[in-house]
Image (tube, rainbow, N blue to C red):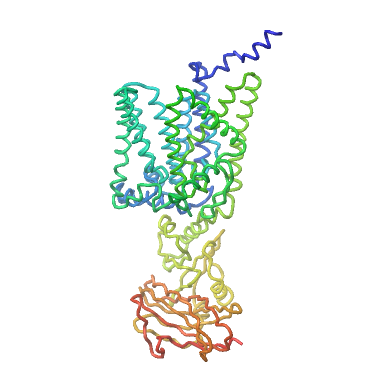
Amino acid sequence: MATHETRERQGPVAPEIIDPVEVDPLPWMILAGWIGLVSITLIAAAARLVRLDEFPAGLADPELAHALIARQGSDFGVQWAIENAGALSIPLVTLITLLGRVTEFDIAAPRMAAGLFGAGSILLTGLWIRRGMGPLWGIAAAAVLAGSFWHLLFSRLALGQIAGTFAVAALCWTLTEASHRRGSAAMVWYVLAGISAGLAFTSAPALRLLPLVMLAGLIVAIVRLYRARITRPDALNWLAATAATYLSMLPFLVANRDAPSRWTPWTETSGLPNDQFSDLTAMPSAIIDTVVGLGLSRSDDPALNMPAEPWFSLLILPWAAIGVLGLISASNEEAMRDHFLVGLGIGATLLIGVSAVDAGNPGHLVLLGAPLAALPVYGFRTLTRWAQVRTVRVALAGLFIAGIGGEGALTYDRYVDQWAAAEQTRTAFNVDLIDALRAIESLDHDEPVLLSVTGRETVLGYFSSTRRRHTFDGARSLPFPARESGYLVVPGSEPLHPSFAVLLEEQAGLTPALEGDGFRGYRLDDRLREQMPFTAPTVPYPDGPVLNGHELTRSGVDHATVLIAWLSSPDAPAYDMELRLRPSDDSVAESSASTAIPANPLRSDLYQVLVVDIDIPENIAQADLGVRLIARDGNAIKVDGVDEDDVLFLNRYAFR
């Protein structure tokens, strides 16, 4: 009995508990490692590549930017795409272009590219940890990254961060492989590491500092060679890696030679919507925010409906924290010191780059997916090495496996049933606008279609309709043909001004000719023209639009809403318009409001009803409403009846 207790205190000696770092792995472990790694990669790829047009159905503006550049690059060439990509991911654009030629650039093309980069980063992460720690540990690291909510989200969205995740994972793997080889074989891996760093540089702005790390590695290698700490072949390997880095970056640098700010993380085009740049004085607090985002939820990002999710959930966070402690402890070992310093240098650089833009959004941490996946694995490994009792090790293994499995299940639920199904996600991903564009295809091709949309040129550029359609801002104008019929299509995310809705449905009695989930379409005819507000005589301006009347409605104690109608000739330019509400007795100061009469895109006359909100001067009994029309050269257009300020009197209103 005493002998048994002594063996328990010394630790288990069964073959299955052998540490793969300290001894060569057994054949069954090698085979199991490959089977497990490939299986996890295939399962993760399936989760990232199925039903791409459903979760969510639509493309967000950052996705569309990549997809549109890829489509145009397919037409105009790679050089054109690089020059016009800005801070978009060149590797992602390239892969979308290749896939788009097969899928015809539908919704699935950009997301398929993102899914392939996501699955590839999982495989490379497993290969990196497998080479550095052992086959079974590689399975664990791949499983941790595959179960990450943020990694799943970005693997199903065509954003440059996921290509950066792939590049960073490739850099970690190739550097680890290079450190385990000698001679010409090592140089091949160092060159691949340099190419990976160059790929990362062109993948995301946050990775723009990585080439400096490679250059610093070369400088350190030269210093150590001078001090006889390393051999000449070792220094040549770092020279090859650095040269490969800068050569692979060269096309980007040449294409953006006139915009050197794009060479830094603080580039003028950000990677996610609503990104805020952190200047040098704010970097310390930004780095703290980034680190806090590893384990604590941050605020939502409404522009992309990004959820308030930390990078590590409570199921994984304790293992990651222990992993950090284990790395700090291992740094005291002579054999681990060089690896620790290299990892610290790369990790610190990545952290600075990630913190340079919107440090409060944990989504940027997806760039560090490969090194972050190693932390909980190393934490589990550290605990199992510290534990001296076999039952404790078995219990720890059970907890770790349960944590990874639970994280994967929760990730799927959070993505499909919560995030992708949310109404905010539908709005952020232009679903109603895309549905409206598709519905337009079913309309009569001989009549013009007017589409209410504001600031969504990228959406329209990617999902370009095969028929003629014209866009307008439904929050301030209502255009319709003056002498023929047409269609007015209104997506739910681009609602009309309430006054226009009243004019269409209540006054004109128009019923929707198209109606779907998130959009409505009206057929415009004489019923709407008969409801035009005609409270003033028709006034034609010289070589300009024709004033067709107005309607003023008091919308509050101190506010009024004015509908004013204009007739524009074919291809007429835009004009600026100013409304003035002037007290008839000059007792108080006048109020004014300005807007623009949009240009007429049709080849026929176009009515345009504008809505203008104007303040009612305080303590006023009566006021005169007038309009002033200004050409784009800044000069007011004169017409019979204007006063000395070029204001045309419309009507007098009593407010008491």
- Residue 99 image point, x, y percent: 40, 43
User: Looking at the figure, which quarter contains the N terminus?
Assistant: top right
| Percent position of residue 107, x then y | 46, 49
User: Residue 384 lies in what quarter of the image?
Assistant: top right
Question: In this rendering, is residue 32 above or below 350?
Answer: above
Residue 162 image-quadrant placement: top left
Q: Nearer the viewer, residue 420 or 364?
A: 364
Image position of 256 (left or right of 360): left
Asked if 323 appears above or below 294 in the picture, the reply is above
Does residue 181 appear left or right of residue 616 in this picture? left
Question: For this rendering, which residue is in front, 407 or 181?
Answer: 181
Is residue 98 visible from the viewing direction of this image?
Answer: no
Instruction: Give coordinates of residue 219: x percent, y percent.
Output: 32, 33
Q: Is residue 609 visible?
A: yes
Please tell me which residue lies in front, 29 or 329: 329
Question: Can you give x and y, in whole percent of width and height, for residue 473 in the image?
Answer: 47, 68
Q: Nearer the viewer, residue 458 or 127?
A: 127
Q: How many marks?
A: 0
- Residue furthest toward the front? 227
> Could you tell me which quadrant the C terminus lies in?
bottom right
Furthest residue in direction right, as rendered? 1
